[in-house]
Image (tube, grey):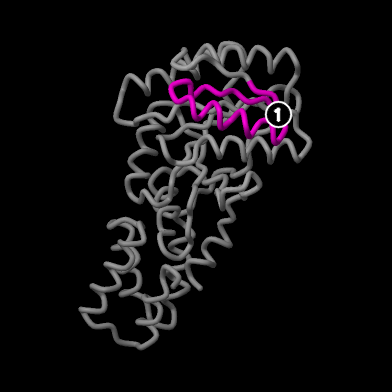
Amino acid sequence: MSLFKRLFNSLRTGSVSSDEWDQIRRSLIASDLGVKLVDEVIEKAKSAKPEDAVLAITNQVKGWLSSKNRELFSDLTRLNTVLIVGVNGTGKTTSTAKLANRLSKSGSKVFLAAADTFRAAATEQLQTWAQRIPAEIVTGETNSDPASVAFSAVTKAKTEKFDYLLVDTAGRLHTKQDLMDELGKVVRVINKQSSVDEILLVIDATTGQNGINQAKIFIEAVGVTGFIITKLDGSAKGGIALAIEKQTGLPIKFVGTGERISDLSDFDPEAYISGLFE
């Protein structure tokens, strides 16, 4: 069932009981839309005429989406650097590989940096993906300084005139200030030689409102420019995309749609909204 189907079905009857409003509210909250946004939707639905409610709510929800550019930054005259950040388990390393594959397939020369040095499996995973793409990669010793990996990567990428440098960072525990500070160090090291053009935060849609809490902390710590959302389901838990853009004002740029390396799509706001309202 689409996210707003129960609401619209009830409105079409022309009369909604108090119990039905409670059920609708619980259903929307369960979709990870968030209590505040749910109450705004219900207020709009109650104040609109039944025949006008769908259009009114559609326009309201569209207004919650970010108006910022969803295209990945690109300057053909120099190296473009993208940091992929996020907490463990969100699909960060896989998303880094998917983006590298996407850029490589479009003709860009891509260099990978495995700066998640605290998790050996992450480095091994990215090395495997790099062989498949194929793409060059720089790694570091387990538990070595991630900033040193970033330094080596940006030096080589600039010298050999790569188009993109993608840096897979450690899966930060967003409640640990020392780890967030370390991520800030990676950003500063790169900015001394080049520039960090994008910082993409990977959010697992199934984490719900916790994903928004993660986003706020990462934005404050390192200046996130956009999101990659994994496991996004437009019907069951799809409210998180609306909530995260409304809360932060930042755009979702990509959506992870599966496990294959090709399973990374542009976030299409119109298609997403359509899916919520079917």
Residue that mark 1 sits on? 135
The residue at the point 44 percent across, 70 percent down is 56
Residue 120: image location, x then y, percent: 48, 24
Say above or below: 215 vs 120. below
Front position in the image: 190 or 53? 190
Q: Position of residue 115 (x, y in %)?
A: 52, 22
What is the count of numbered marks? Answer: 1
Residue 168, placed above or below residue 245? above
Which residue is depicted at the point 48% across and 62% down? 234
Q: Is residue 212 left or right of residue 21?
A: right
Q: Classify residue 111 as left or right of residue 29.
A: right
Name the one closer to the observer, 150 or 8: 150
- In which quadrant will I find the N terminus? bottom left
In the drawing, does residue 111 fall left or right of residue 251?
right
On the image, which quarter does residue 136 sit in?
Answer: top right
- Image coords of residue 40 (percent x, y): 32, 62
Please check the rendered image and state whether residue 130 is part of the magenta-colored stretch, yes or no.
yes
Q: Residue furthest right?
A: 107
Identify the element where label 1 is drawn: loop
Question: Which amino acid type is shown beneath numbered disc 1?
Answer: Ala
Front residue of this view, candidates 208 and 121: 121
Task: Please say if 60 is above or below 86.
Answer: below
Q: Is residue 260 above or below residue 89?
A: below
Query: Would residue 218 be found to the left or right of residue 125 on screen?
Result: left
Is residue 120 part of the magenta span, yes or no?
yes
Pinpoint residue 77: horizontal percent, then vertical percent. Answer: 75, 24
Which residue shows up at 63% across the image and 44% down it? 261
Point out the stretch of residues depicted in magenta.
111-137
Crowding near pointer 1: few (<14 within 10 Å), some, many (20+)?
Answer: some
